[in-house]
Image: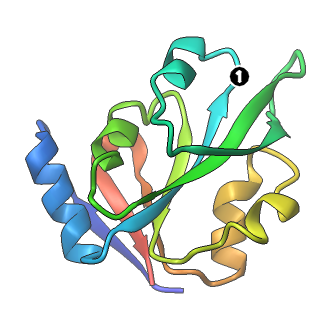
């Protein structure tokens, strides 16, 4: 897979971030996310259309779990929400609909990114400190 780094502005506004995502996924995208169960406030603010697919073991001690789920964001209503909480959750943007198999194959927290890379699925993930997006093509 080729990886393209897309630099982001230091102060990304909602409009700027949505424009970047629209340029890559003009028909909307799926957001696949892993959210720690102890992030009650974050979980309570998730939109009703966020599908909580399964619980997944996190790579922490003591052992804890997270919620694995997805949302089909065809109107770009939620991409910035996930961008804002990048420091608390793991997520991937993709045009591919993977809901049938992805959550059956995920066994632990670290498997999200490797699943997309091993299956060679076009996707976006966030780089360190929200400095760039990594576009896997």
Q: Quadrant of the N terminus?
A: bottom right
Q: Residue at x 76, y 56 (%)?
A: 111
Instruction: Report x, y in % for residue 26.
Output: 24, 77
Q: Is residue 113 above or below residue 108?
A: below
Q: Quadrant of the C terminus?
A: bottom left
Instruction: Report x, y in % for residue 87.
Output: 46, 30
Q: Is residue 75 above or below residue 1?
A: above
Q: Residue at x 40, y 67 (%)?
A: 29
Q: Nearer the viewer, residue 7 or 121?
A: 121
Q: Would residue 13 appear left or right of 103 to someone viewing this image?
A: left
Classify residue 34 by image quadrant: top right
Q: Nearer the viewer, residue 125 or 54?
A: 54
Q: Would residue 122 appear left or right of 54 to someone viewing this image?
A: left
Residue on which disc 1 sits: 37
What colour scheme was applied to this rendering of the protein?
A: rainbow
Labels in figure, total: 1
Q: Would residue 86 appear left or right of 34 to someone viewing this image?
A: left
Mark 1 packing: few (<14 Cα in 10 Å), some, or many (20+)?
A: some
Instruction: Report x, y in % for residue 21.
Output: 25, 64
Instruction: Report x, y in % for residue 18.
Output: 19, 55
Q: Residue at x 34, y 41 (%)?
A: 83
Let me know if residue 126 appears in the view.
yes
Let me know if residue 129 appears in the view.
no
Q: Nearer the viewer, residue 39 or 3?
A: 39
Q: Is residue 59 above or below residue 5?
A: above
Q: Residue at x 68, y 56 (%)?
A: 112
For label 1, the SS is loop
């Amino acid at each position: 897979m080729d990886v393209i780094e897309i630099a982001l502005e230091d102060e990304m506004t909602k409009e700027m971030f949505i424009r970047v995502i629209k340029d890559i996924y003009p028909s909307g995208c799926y957001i696949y996310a892993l959210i720690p169960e102890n992030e009650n406030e974050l979980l309570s603010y998730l939109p009703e259309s966020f599908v909580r697919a399964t619980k997944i073991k996190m790579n922490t001690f003591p052992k804890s779990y997270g919620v694995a789920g997805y949302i089909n964001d065809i109107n770009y209503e939620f991409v910035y929400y996930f961008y804002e909480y990048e420091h608390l959750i793991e997520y991937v943007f993709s045009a591919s609909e993977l809901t049938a198999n992805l959550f059956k194959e995920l066994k632990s927290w670290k498997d999200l990114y490797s699943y997309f890379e091993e299956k060679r699925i076009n996707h976006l993930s966030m780089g360190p400190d929200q400095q760039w997006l990594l576009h896997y093509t």
